[in-house]
Amino acid sequence: MWRLQLVFALSVARRLDPTPPITNQYFVDSLLLAHNEIRNEYGERAADMIHMSWDIGLARLAQAWTIYCKNELNPNLKRGNIYPRFNYIGENLYMGPSIDIFKIVTSWGLESNYYNFQNNTCQPGKNCDHFTQIIWGSTFKVGCGAAYCAHMSAYVVSCTYGPRGNVPGQDPFIQGEKCSKCKGEMCKVASCSNPQRDNNYGDYNFCPDFAKIDCYRLGKGNIRVNNVTIRVGLECPDCIYTDGDSENLNEDHYDYVEGSRYFNMTPSSAVETSYNCFLIISLICNITILIFSFTMP
């Protein structure tokens, strides 16, 4: 009977800890909204802030790195032309116990408390690179990916940006009247918007050369990494996927904050519910075993 309980526990574990696929609209919209709200805030003093929009190729690039389950920036991005659309790519990275896009991006934005706009410096001992990448005026594309690293009980979220920001010796943007250097483009809140540029979602077929699994599966759905060592190939025995499009609740588990525009996923509710169910079924199984043990001659 304990084997049945173990099988049930494993089946529950396979459905826990979901991450949004890079095509999940809530995920995309939440990230764009969180980024552009920060950009619009500082765009009030920027003459050349460009509206930020989604790029699926950058999202694939970000997703491919999250599967490595490392709390460090992707060293492959130091190479030029890793994604043909941009010469160099920027990156922000998060690792933590849950996914809440608003909290993650806001935490990056709060580095503004340590940044000095007058002399383009960061307070000693602090990091401002996440913040300055978000508000970099000439960066206009972002793509993000996420994975759950079960062996570390942690989520990894990577956002990659094109063209990259944080160029040494350069200010994040030209200070001045908002949108004054939009070159005829529409001023959208506090940034320069071009529908043709904003609606160009990049290369859907892009496959990073460092990807540990094939890119069809990489872009198809959620990924739960069970082991730090992942094999290369069409099948990844250490990964669990869902397609992100099914109406089957056992396949797609998402938690959204009630009334919030932001994608929010924390393991607590799903884990607690599944764990309670497991306890109840285990209790039933144990009672059944006791009944049979007393009734058998």
Image (cartoon, helix red, strand yellow):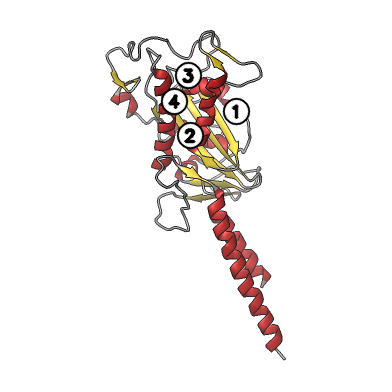
Q: Are marks 4 and 2 in contact (CB under 8 Å)?
A: no
Q: Earlier in the sequence, mark 4 or mark 3?
A: 4
Where does label 3 land, which residue?
Answer: 87
Q: Position of residue 121 (x, y in %)?
A: 57, 12
| Residue 16 appears in the figure | no
Q: Earlier in the sequence, mark 4 or mark 2?
A: 4
Of badges 4 and 3, the one in the foreground is 4
Where does label 1 land, which residue?
Answer: 73
Where does label 4 land, which residue?
Answer: 38
The crowding category of the residue bearing disc 1, from other C-alpha atoms within 10 Å (few below 14, some 14 to 19, many at least 20), is some
Residue pictured at 44% horizontal, 34% vertical: 31
User: Which quadrant would residue 119 be assigned to in this image?
Assistant: top right
Q: Position of residue 66 (x, y in %)?
A: 56, 37
Q: Are marks 1 and 4 in contact (CB under 8 Å)?
A: no
Residue pictured at 63% horizontal, 71% vertical: 283
Q: Earlier in the sequence, mark 3 or mark 2?
A: 3
Does dot 1 land on a helix, a strand or a loop?
loop
Residue pictured at 43% horizontal, 19% vertical: 42
User: Which quadrant would residue 169 be assigned to in this image?
Assistant: top right
| Residue 58 appears in the figure | yes
**Alpha carbon distance from label 1 to label 4:** 22 Å
